[in-house]
Image: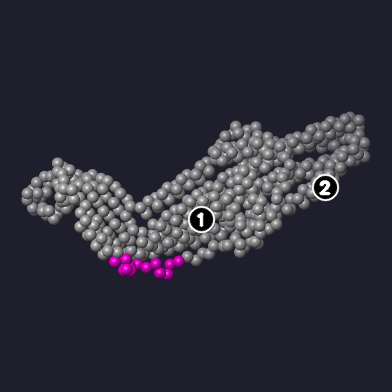
């Protein structure tokens, strides 16, 4: 009967040396199996994509004036800074990004745990009747009793071919990518808040111009009415002057609607608090002059969180391939247990109930109906996709920088030309109004020149706001103070 039960040890000899001799011999036999090659082979499976090198597609250039991580402070707008701080703390999209970082950290911890032995303790007890005609002869056969086990079990996968180490590297790269993506999301939120803030300033500046134009048209309508009474004008001019007032009132109503919608969009960015933007009325301050690089910087990769995240995704996919490829080779597991086992609960803690065991195992994949090859092919396809995403992200980043710099350089000329055009329109309007007052021209000339003035005043507000928005876009395109080495150092 004893050969069917756990080995009974004499008191005081729970782990004899003979057991370790057996374990070493068994492990040697299992290790010899590593020289064997399984029938499942990864041959002929690879990826096709090739990542672009930034230095190969942009000029080599040095550009040390990168935005700081609190670049919005340069605008000297305390309300803007407060709104950005609130958005970075309450925006739901950033909360989701932080959740992804936490998940990536948990995946790293899980991958790291597979490199260490797993130890557990447990107790089990089962009561049963042993049949007389079973494998156990009488007196155990035909009796009722319980089998009990109280032991510590340990399992360790010996990572000879690096499968678990590659999985850990992939998890680390994924965590770095998640951290970089969170920084990209923070930058996008801050830039969106700034753009909406300056858009409100632009709309309010245009509304101020429209209100001044309405007041001026009311005064002119009174002047025309007085001239009609004196017989100097007809009712045609009076109707023209009066009709121009509702027209500008409609423009004021349109601007009020646009201001309300933009305030609502800004409130969404700061966590849905409408009271934070209800009375927001920023002035259109003087636009800063962006400091432009002489050429596109070749180290753009290190200053864009989205590009860095895409590069980490490529690295993670590469490690996933290494981990999957290692599954084609033998895996070696070592399990051991030590504890107490007895037939009958009352004898569990007796000295003779001690038991132990060591069980090394080697697994060789021989035939799996193509499962591993399909898994490896999928991993290579993931790498090709990650490389394509990286290349697209890099090219889009470079295009964003080029477009923003081109627009800023063109803006200087546009503002200069607009100032000249506005000066001419203002002068023409003053002359037309003076000539109309003395009866040298008709009211249609006044309306025509006034339309030109209104158009130029609105254009001036548009260009001033555009200068601010382009400055925000440039800071975002240049990375917004992000540093890739900060993410790498935290891995």
The segment highlighted magenta reads 32-46
Q: At which x and y percent is residue 148?
A: 18, 45
Q: Is residue 204 visible?
A: no
Residue at the disc numbered 2 = 420
What is the residue that sits farthest to the left in this orientation? Answer: 138
Q: At which x and y percent is residue 258?
A: 66, 39
Report the Cα–Cα distance between label 1 and label 2. 51 Å
Quarter location, residue 194 = top right
Image check: 27 left or right of 109? left
Q: First in sequence, mark 1 or 2: give its number.
A: 1
Q: Image point 76% across, 44% down: which residue?
A: 460
Q: Is residue 227 above or below residue 51?
A: above
Q: Image point 46% across, 60% down: which residue?
A: 318
Query: Which numbered disc covers residue 80?
Result: none
Q: Is residue 135 above or below residue 248?
A: below
Q: Nearer the viewer, residue 449 or 304?
A: 304
Q: Nearer the viewer, residue 47 or 210?
A: 47
Q: Secondary structure at mark 1?
A: helix
Q: Image point 72% across, 39% down: which residue?
A: 284
Image check: 214 left or right of 2? right
Image check: 291 left or right of 12? right
Q: Secondary structure at mark 2?
A: helix
Q: Nearer the viewer, mark 1 or mark 2?
A: 1
Residue at the disc numbered 1 = 312
44 part of magenta stretch: yes
Label 2 Cα crowd, 10 Å radius (few <14 / some 14-19 / many 20+): few
Residues marked 1 and 2 touching at CB (< 8 Å): no
Q: Image point 10% across, 53% down: which residue?
A: 1
Q: At which x and y percent is residue 238?
A: 84, 34
Label 1 Cα crowd, 10 Å radius (few <14 / some 14-19 / many 20+): many
Colour approach in the figure: one colour
């Amino acid at each position: 009967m004893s050969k069917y039960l756990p080995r009974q040890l004499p008191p005081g000899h729970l782990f004899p040396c003979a057991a370790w001799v057996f374990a070493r011999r068994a492990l040697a036999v299992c290790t010899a199996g590593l020289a064997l090659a399984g029938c499942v082979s990864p041959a002929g499976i690879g990826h096709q994509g090739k990542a672009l090198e930034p230095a190969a597609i942009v000029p080599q250039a040095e550009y040390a004036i990168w935005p700081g991580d609190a670049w919005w402070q340069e605008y000297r707008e305390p309300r803007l800074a407060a709104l950005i701080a609130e958005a970075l703390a309450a925006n739901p999209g950033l909360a989701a990004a932080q959740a992804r970082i936490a998940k990536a950290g948990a995946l790293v911890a899980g991958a790291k745990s597979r490199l260490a032995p797993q130890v557990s303790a447990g107790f089990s007890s089962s009561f049963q009747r042993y049949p007389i005609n079973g494998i156990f002869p009488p007196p155990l056969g035909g009796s009722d009793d319980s089998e009990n086990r109280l032991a510590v079990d340990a399992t360790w996968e010996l990572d000879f071919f690096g499968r678990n180490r590659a999985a850990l590297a992939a998890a680390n790269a994924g965590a770095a990518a998640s951290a970089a993506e969170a920084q990209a999301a923070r930058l996008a939120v801050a830039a969106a808040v700034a753009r909406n803030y300056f858009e409100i300033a632009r709309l309010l500046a245009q509304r101020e111009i429209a209100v001044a134009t309405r007041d001026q048209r009311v005064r002119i309508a009174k002047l025309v009415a007085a001239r009609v009474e004196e017989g100097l004008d007809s009712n045609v001019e009076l109707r023209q002057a009066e009709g121009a007032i509702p027209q500008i009132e409609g423009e004021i109503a349109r601007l009020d609607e646009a201001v309300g919608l933009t305030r609502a969009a800004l409130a969404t960015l700061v966590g849905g608090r409408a009271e934070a933007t209800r009375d927001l009325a920023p002035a259109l301050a003087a636009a800063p002059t962006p400091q432009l690089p002489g050429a596109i910087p070749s180290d753009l990769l290190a200053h864009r969180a989205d590009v860095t995240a895409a590069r980490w995704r490529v690295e993670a996919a590469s490690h996933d391939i290494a981990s999957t490829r290692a599954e084609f080779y033998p895996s070696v597991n070592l399990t051991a247990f030590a504890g107490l086992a007895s037939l009958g609960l009352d004898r569990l803690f007796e000295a003779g109930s001690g038991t132990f065991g060591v069980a090394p195992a080697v697994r060789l994949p021989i035939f799996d109906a193509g499962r591993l090859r399909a898994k490896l092919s999928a991993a290579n396809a993931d790498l090709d996709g990650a490389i394509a995403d990286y290349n697209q992200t890099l090219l889009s980043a470079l295009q964003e920088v080029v477009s923003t710099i081109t627009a800023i350089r063109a803006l200087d000329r546009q503002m200069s030309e607009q100032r000249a055009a506005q000066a001419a329109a203002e002068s023409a309007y003053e002359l037309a109004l003076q000539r109309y007052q003395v009866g040298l021209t008709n009211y249609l000339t006044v309306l025509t020149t006034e339309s030109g003035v209104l158009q130029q005043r609105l254009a001036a507000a548009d260009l001033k706001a555009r200068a601010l928005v382009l400055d925000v876009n440039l800071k975002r395109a240049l990375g917004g103070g992000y540093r890739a080495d900060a993410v790498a150092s935290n891995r």
